[in-house]
Image (tube, helix red, strand yellow):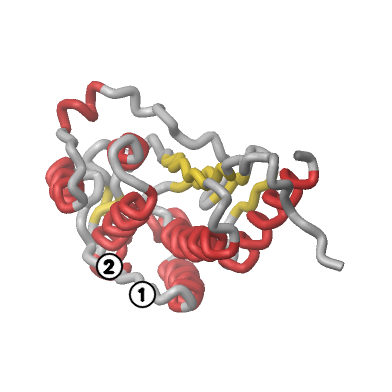
Amino acid sequence: MTTMNHRLDVPPRAMHVDFHLDLICPWCWIGLRNVRTAWNAMRALRPDLPMALSWRANTLLPHIPEQGVPYQPFYVARLGSEDAVAARRAQIQVVAQSVDLTLNFGAITTFPNTQRVCAVVNLAQEQLATEAMFDFVESIFSAFFAQGRDIGSVDTLQSLAQAAGLDWDAARLDAEPLHRRQSNASGVPHVVIDDQWSMTGARPAAELLQLMLHSADAATSHA
């Protein structure tokens, strides 16, 4: 016997996904790829279920100077040695390759303060649709981790915003509260579904999809 997951007289409720991230976190780029895969799979499996995605970007290291600091020395000091840095990067590269990413750590010269770029992401969702937001945030990660560009720079952000069709300028952004829509998560990437179910870390798309399905089924059973 087949069990129905919905009643025809009950309108579908929207599924809400919050994605918490920082733009200098390589695990967040991997996490973005997994969220996007799970998101598209969920839309294919439940085409009648409205879905909404909120971006919650926040800098985890607000003490970094506005102009940034030298990237390589920062990580050697943070992890204790060049060998430790190399081991961590090798670990990240293996996972990144599983989602078709290659990170060019050697091209990066500046570790930026990400308050401005996080504010740009949080504001951009007011103008860009979900797929365009995925593309825009991907372009920021690519600029930093593939091209070695300084994403703390106003010029870099202006260029990326214009390429995305985003109506933005530095004067407007600097007038906005930087905490607007920011993340309150203690670690990133962090995904919250319907304010009830969450996962921290660059979890595989299959796990995120199962959590989405679980939330959808739980909501339907209580409708």
Q: Is residue 152 left or right of residue 223?
A: left
Residue positioned 54% across, 57% down in the render: 47
Q: Above or below — where is 97 with respect to 19?
A: below
Q: Is residue 48 left or right of residue 6?
A: left
Whether residue 209 is visible, yes or no, is: yes
* View extreme (front): residue: 9
Whether residue 120 is visible, yes or no, is: no
Residue 196, position as x, y percentages in the image:
69, 41
Element class at badge 1: loop
Residue 175, position as x, y percentages in the image:
23, 21
Residue 57, position as x, y percentages in the image:
42, 41
Three-letter amino acid code at the position of disc 1 = Thr
In terms of depth relative to the viewer, which is nearer, 222 or 30? 222
Residue positioned 61% across, 52% down in the render: 200
Q: Are marks 2 and 1 in contact (CB under 8 Å)?
A: yes
Three-letter amino acid code at the position of disc 2 = Ala
Q: Report the quarter where the N terminus lies.
A: bottom right
Q: Which residue is mark 1?
A: 102
Residue count near mark 2 (Cα–Cα under 10 Å), binned few <14, some 14–19, many ≥20: some
Alpha carbon of mark 2 to alpha carbon of mark 1: how far?
A: 7 Å
Quadrant housing residue 186: top right
Residue positioned 64% across, 38% down in the render: 195
Residue 40, position as x, y percentages in the image:
49, 62
Q: Above or below — where is 181 with respect to 69?
A: above
Q: Which residue is mark 2?
A: 146
Quadrant housing residue 166: top left
